[in-house]
Amino acid sequence: MRHKPTIAITGANGFVGKALVNHFYTMGWNIVTLTRNGHHTDLSHDITDIPYDLGNDINAKLLERVDYLIHAAYAKDNLALNVAAAERLLDAARAAQVKQVLFISSMSAHNNATSIYGRQKYAIEKMFLESGRLCIRPGLIAGNGGIFRNILSTAGRFHIIPIISGGNQPVQLIKLDDLVSAIGEIIISDKSRIITVAHPTQITYKKLFKIVFERAKIQVLFLHLPYWLAYVIFWVIGQGLPSIGISHDNLAGLKNLQSSDTTKEMTELGLNLPPIEDYIATIKLG
């Protein structure tokens, strides 16, 4: 009988984590969800939930039957905790002889990152590569969650969107289902590397959401703010403005966005994506 793979997923209740659970469930894999409050799903068959907290050690024995592990959990604005948790998880996976461990990073991760989010992702990437593991850097994830959905929801409620320093920052998009499909292909690799998963074509932050709002028939006012003024406003508010979908740390990341030619990676993964405006038109907005 063919071996049925078992995959463990941290952060299985999150935006990407839930999609990964559904993807591997559909593929017929055994699934172990590592969550703090139990996995919230209607699925039950072949899914085991193990209590997991980023601040605690994880017993390697709990991973002994796990073939693959995806690390998608993170604590907001807590670099030290996230890095320490990743180190503990790598140690447990090594002791349990897990075949491959994949870290979901971000295109915000690079050596010039100024946001806490980007710096923590970059630090964890280095640990994973040193351990012979995999890292994936998604572009801006389009789906029913995350920053993309927050901004869209705000537009529908308040019809105002902040545009920082002209809104010309380069954005590379990836739909959630394409990201999950790519992870399904990558996780079985025995290579240690960083792979970026995003549409090869850059589009500016302002143009992207202009197209999205027009398609959704949402009228919005683009509120133009110079970076320094936006920084002061977000700093004073402290926790950012959840109502407009962008936090103070997101603002720091926005200033240092980097792009990448992903043509080779997309071809390798079999993701033959249409031209960017056609791709945007396929995003489910409801």
Image (cartoon, helix red, strand yellow):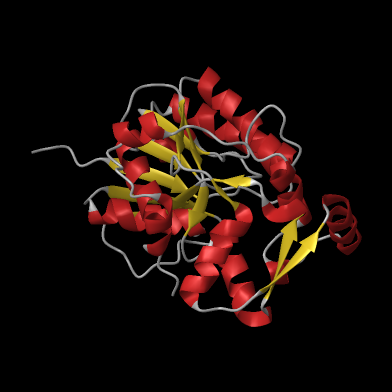
272 left or right of 245?
left
Residue at image point 37% right, 57% down: 278
In which quadrant will I find the C terminus? bottom left
Residue 154 position (above or below residue 225): below
Residue 96 percent across, percent down from the top left: 41, 29
Residue at image point 37% right, 49% down: 275
Q: Nearer the viewer, residue 152 or 183?
A: 152
Q: Quadrant of residue 107?
A: top right
Residue 151 percent across, percent down from the top left: 62, 66
17 left or right of 273?
right
Residue 49 percent across, percent down from the top left: 42, 55
Q: Is residue 230 visible?
A: yes
Q: Is residue 11 visible?
A: no
Residue at image point 64% right, 75% down: 220
Residue 169 percent across, percent down from the top left: 66, 46
167 left or right of 24?
right
Q: Nearer the viewer, residue 129 or 36?
A: 129
Residue 158 position (above or below residue 85): below
Q: Nearer the viewer, residue 26 or 90?
A: 26
Residue 77 position (above or below residue 130): below
Residue found farthest to the bottom: 157
Residue at image point 36% right, 62% down: 282
In which quadrant will I find the N terminus? top left
